[in-house]
Amino acid sequence: MDVSVTQASSRLPPASAGAPLEAALAALLELRGLDLRDWRPAVLEARLKGAAEAAGCDGVPSLLERARADPALWETIAQTLLRRPAAWFWDPRFFRALRARVTPLLKTYPSVRVWVPGEIGGEEAAAIAIVLDEEGVLDRSRVYATGPVDAGLDAARAGRFDAAALDQAAPDYYRGGGRAGLSSHFAFDLAGATLADRLKRRIVFGQHSLATDGSLNEFHLIVCRRALLDFNARLRQRAFQVFWESLPVLGVLALPAGEPPLPELPFQALDRAAGLFRRSC
């Protein structure tokens, strides 16, 4: 165990010294460099309670006291706070519009860069790669999937997913315009499902925090849908600025339906109902 982490954990104030959520966020920032202070409190509180229940603690303060003595527990807490339930092909309307409105635009570029920020489990990046493959764009594309902690992306980097979740996603895949058959993009075994190599080699996973980091590169398409729902107003504003700086003119930004970009940033609606916008200047 890292001695410096152990010593730092022992110096943290007890959970009773302040609100449990504030204590947890301060500890994660101090020990893991993970800044979740501008995530929505209601989201984090619910997940923190879930972490306490999973650890067999009678409440969040008890969980934090245990973590003071066992710093390795902070990694589990971090992963629990970041984790979202798997949601393959969430909002089929978006995927229909992605196929009909966006992939024809991407075909006009000799090479395509796609960014999926705020990724945790890898499902969104894999779903985007599947669409690009079926629409004939993947061979010229690279999908960059980033999350606030690199360790949480290990399973996604290996292309390993839950087979039962994929079975449940099949109806949404077809409603979103899927036509090759979802199972054709995976290899299955007793342990689960593995993304096909032709897709996996087109996805690059890495660490990036929208709370602290700036633009990575210029991207033709940025997809940030479920992650944005976890952010408070201040972090959303920061994220939108990073997205604008990362798009060329006419680059496409995909957001949750009903979540338009900041009005002061020059975006035009490409398909507002599907959450698709283009940088106008």
Image: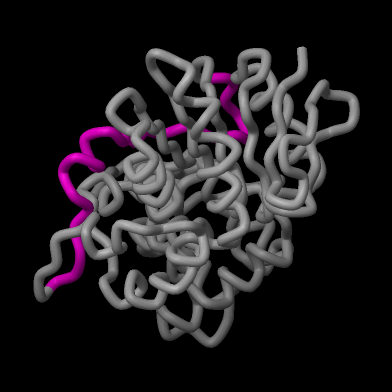
Q: Is residue 191 left or right of residue 80?
A: left
Tell me what residue is drawn at x 77 percent, y 12 percent: 281
Q: Is residue 7 visible?
A: no
The picture quadrant where one finds residue 142 is top left
Q: Find residue 168 and report its horizontal and vertical position in percent.
A: 40, 77
- Looking at the image, residue 263 lies above or below residue 7: above
Decide which of 136, 221 is in the foreground and name it.
136
Say whether residue 62 is magenta: no
Q: Which residues are magenta?
A: 191-215
Q: Find residue 6 and report its horizontal and vertical position in percent.
A: 36, 50
Tell me what residue is drawn at x 42 percent, y 22 percent: 112
Decide which of 23, 263 is in the foreground and name it.
263
Q: Is residue 161 left or right of residue 111?
A: left
The picture quadrant where one finds residue 32 is top left
- Looking at the image, residue 249 lies above or below residue 121: above
Q: Is residue 95 left or right of residue 125?
A: right
Number of on-image labels: 0
Tell me what residue is drawn at x 79 percent, y 53 percent: 258
Tell me what residue is drawn at x 26 percent, y 72 percent: 163
Q: Find residue 179 and report its horizontal and vertical position in percent.
A: 36, 58
The furthest residue to the right: 264
Q: Find residue 119 and report its horizontal and vertical position in percent.
A: 47, 46
Say whether residue 213 is magenta: yes
Q: Is residue 194 visible?
A: yes
Colouring chosen for the image of the structure = one colour
